[in-house]
Amino acid sequence: MTSEKPIQPDNTAVRTALWRALHLQADAKPYVMEDEVGLRLVAPDDDWQERPDMKYTKRLRASVVARSRFIEDIAKTQIEKGVRQYVLLGAGLDSFAQRNTVLGPQVDIYEIDQPDTLAWKKKRLKETGYGVADNLHFVPVNFEVSSWWKELLKSGFDVQQRAVVSCVGVTIYLTRETIAATLQKMKLLAPGSTIAIAFYLPIDMLDKEDQPMQEIAIKGAAAAGTPFVSFFSEEQIKALAREAGLKDIQTISTKDMTDRYFQNRIDDFVPASGEVFLVATT
């Protein structure tokens, strides 16, 4: 009789959570954001900082920290304006609910991700004493197979109420058709809702120094069975948003992120090029 395979979180979710924690341990102040919750959940070996994906990826770490801070800034602004629903597409090991003890309880948080990742996360939150608050809803979905929108509605999401929706680290794995369908679903959100979605530039549009690392990432993703599928220019991103009927469309580039969060640093901690955010409203 064979034993069941233990539930494991997605490797990318673990890596990004550890990058957020490593920022506090390896980079100079001021910190772009402070998040060690994922580190406590993962509980890696003592030499985790020496892993190649930790030791040689400083610019990628800066990108992850920047996008996490950017998304949280948007979410906090909307919650302060009265929005009471926060949806995270591709939540991974996000820890907004655990760290924001004042704003967090004011909003229903819907974390959407692969079933194994969410099941593992729920288990670890309980084991580490964080617990799972009543307003934190886990919505397991395989994006290419099942409808995240239908599963979200089943979880109690109210389409009559405004929401803020984030989506990071997801579009690169999806086909253009699936991405377009996802944006079309955004039109079903209550008017005045805000969305922020990360897209990824083609390799030839990256800074030269970032291209070798991206080539390695592309090969690694393919070898792991999770190939990178979709890359877009900023104009193509805007066109997708217009086709979906979104409003107040803007894109936020790596340079915008650098100007916003990395000014006057005493180290060379700056984000890698390649990630572009679409921010829009319904």
Image (spheres, grey):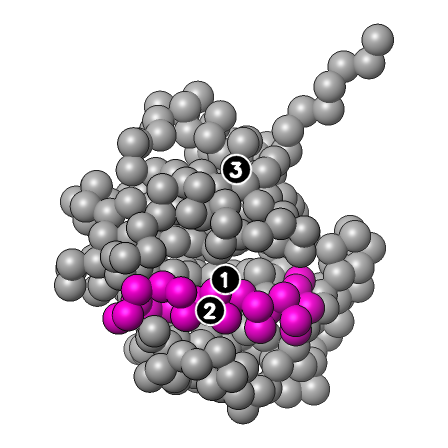
**Placement of the N terminus among the 4 image quadrants:** top right
Give 36 or 85, whichever is nearer the viewer.
Answer: 85
The magenta stretch is: 172-196
Number of the label disc, if any, that sits on residue 100: none
Of callouts 1 and 2, the N-terminal one: 1
Q: Is residue 75 left or right of residue 278?
A: left
Q: Which residue is mark 1?
A: 168
Q: Is residue 215 above or below residue 108?
A: below
Residue 142 visible to an observer of this rendering: yes
Q: Is residue 80 above or below residue 92?
A: below
Of callouts 3 and 2, the N-terminal one: 3
Q: Residue at x 21, y 41 (%)?
A: 105
Location of residue 123 in the rendering, given as x and y in whole percent from the top left corner: 49, 26
* Real-space CA distance between mark 3 and mark 2, rounded to the nearest whole angstrom: 20 Å
What is the secondary structure assignment of the residue under circle 1? loop
Q: Which residue is mark 3?
A: 118
* Real-space CA distance between mark 1 and mark 3, rounded to the nearest whole angstrom: 16 Å
**Placement of the C terminus among the 4 image quadrants:** bottom left
Q: Residue at x 35, y 82 (%)?
A: 247
